[in-house]
Image: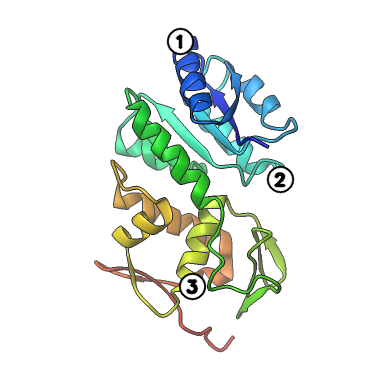
Amino acid sequence: MSILILIVEDEQDLARTLKYNLEREGYATRCALTASDALLFARQEPLPDLVLLDLMLPDMSGTEVCRRLRQDELTQHVPVIILTAKGEEIDRVVGFEVGADDYVVKPFSVRELMLRVRAILRRAQPEEAALPKDSDVVFGRLRLDVPGYRVWVDEQAVHLTALEFKLLTTLYQRKGRVQSREALLSDVWDITADVMTRTVDTHIKRLREKLGAAGDYIETLRGVGYCFLAAPANE
């Protein structure tokens, strides 16, 4: 089955351009011109594998659409790339805080966008080489089901986006070793063009908040980066 990408864009010329280029790359597409259609189409079978989301929609902000996608169990793991003319740092931070996986400022190169789409779809599949495939990973209060993209803290389910899950498993696989922001941008985000190291800080903050008591397993080394504890403390 083809990978399905939901295009949420009210500028019809741009929507047609995106549709043409994505389909030329071999992806299937579905288009929504409004936020209400986007939320409806995002829940229809087959579910999209990725959403390209404009922020300036006629009936609701794209930020709110992203927030609702993240709150819905059916769509919470679907990667989202925000497309917008708003390029200020605060706009990017807000986009990432509501759960976007990437942020592309208009006008953009179609070639760069295609690279970002491929990168997002690749990293949506967590690397399992260093993690067991037939059993859960347990680390102190944290439990991971890698093939199922599921996480528990103290046996309570925690809902992570695909990117947050990739960030967590990458840090876990390298536990005890400091990871610079640049290394995480390269290995988790896959491409680094026009992506700020602040992006890493924002996602680490959100990940810690979601992990609650297990968030302390991720340490900050000021001026250096982040490190997952080599072993859980006595709890």
- Residue where numbered disc 3 is placed: 173
Spatial CA span between label 1 and label 2: 32 Å
Which numbered disc, 2 or 3, marks the residue that appears first in the sequence? 2
Q: Is residue 136 left or right of residue 213?
A: right
If you read the primary sequence from the N terminus, does the residue marked by circle 3 or circle 1 appear first? 1
**The N terminus, quarter of image:** top right
x%, y% of residue 125? Answer: 56, 54
By what rule are the colours in the image chosen? rainbow
Query: Which residue, given by chain and number where applicable, does mark 1 sit on?
Result: 13
The residue singled out by tag 2 in the image is 73
Which quadrant holds residue 74?
A: top right
* Amino acid type assigned to the residue bearing label 3 in the image: Gln
Query: Foreground residue, 226 or 109?
Result: 109
- Helix, strand or loop at disc 1? helix
> For the point 35% across and 55% down, which residue is it?
185
Q: Is residue 177 above or below residue 198?
A: below
